[in-house]
Image (spheres, rainbow, N blue to C red):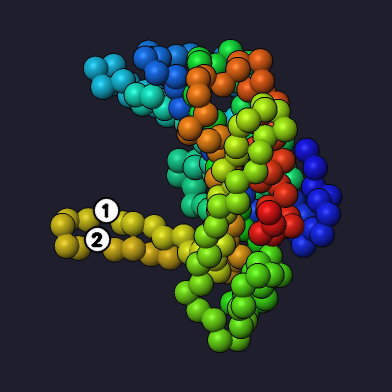
Amino acid sequence: MPNDQHNAKTSLDQLQTEQLRLTAFLAPNERVVEPHWFTELTGTEPETRVSHPSRGVFQETGVVGGLHGLALSVQPGRIDWFLLARREEGTVPQSSWIGLVSETLPVFQSLMTTWLENAPPISRLALGAVLHEPAESREQSYRRLAEFLPHIMISPEESTDFLYQINRPRGSSVINGLQIQRLSKWACALNVLMQIQVAPIGQGQMTRIGEEQISSRIELDMSTDPQFAGPLPPTFLGALFTELVEMAVELATAGDIA
């Protein structure tokens, strides 16, 4: 997994992970009923399980590697896997970030590549990521965004409420004729964890937990073209997911490039 892209403006060791996601859209008429993927993938039982067979909805959550939260969500036509912050009962989280991208992304990529080896027929595959580069101030965050987005005029001292989104499709090197949608969103973020105290209606209270965290926020969605005809070839799914990871790393480290 590369992190030495040309013209790199940051590295995976400088980026924090909020969330990683794999989304698989099922081929037409495919249906999944209460799979055992979580246990097969992690070797442990999930901590929670929700099943509504009549609606085709199934969810499991648990821990992978003793460090990160892993969630599986199945609904008609769609499967989602999430790597999330681990929430331990009775403890107060200090951050919504789950670790450096250089640590979390290899874990998630390995798990998902293994799952894809025996996944049901898939018509579309996507990788989502919400990443942060911590900053000491709003001005510093905007200066970093200006470096990531060289085509956009940003004044670090005067800019507020900035949000930039663009899709730069690129042809796949794994499957001929397949386009990859490379959607990225960029913003300056103020991250604050809040705790809600349960109380009678109208008397609830929200309390801030921990310190404010300012960051340059990067949200990525790498996905195969929905217009691609037919299910994706099963033997190429692992390589295709690796390609999505590489494209995400390129954008996250080098900025908005074609």
SS at mark 2 in the image: loop
The quarter holding residue 215 reads: bottom right
SS at mark 1 in the image: loop
- Residue indicated by mark 2: 204
Crowding at dot 2, Cα within 10 Å, few <14 / some 14-19 / many 20+, comes out as few
Question: Of the residues shown, which amino acid type is indicated by label 1?
Answer: Val
- Quarter of the picture holding the C terminus: bottom right
**Rendering coords of residue 251 (x, y %):** 68, 52
Observer-nearest of 66 and 79: 79
Task: State the residue at coordinates (29%, 63%).
Answer: 205
User: Are the two marked residues, 1 and 2, in contact with CB atoms closer than 8 angstroms?
Assistant: yes
Task: State the residue at coordinates (80%, 42%).
Answer: 2
- Residue indicated by mark 1: 198
**Rendering coords of residue 173 (x, y %):** 72, 33
Q: Is residue 139 visible?
A: yes
Task: Count every numbered label the image shows and give the total.
Answer: 2
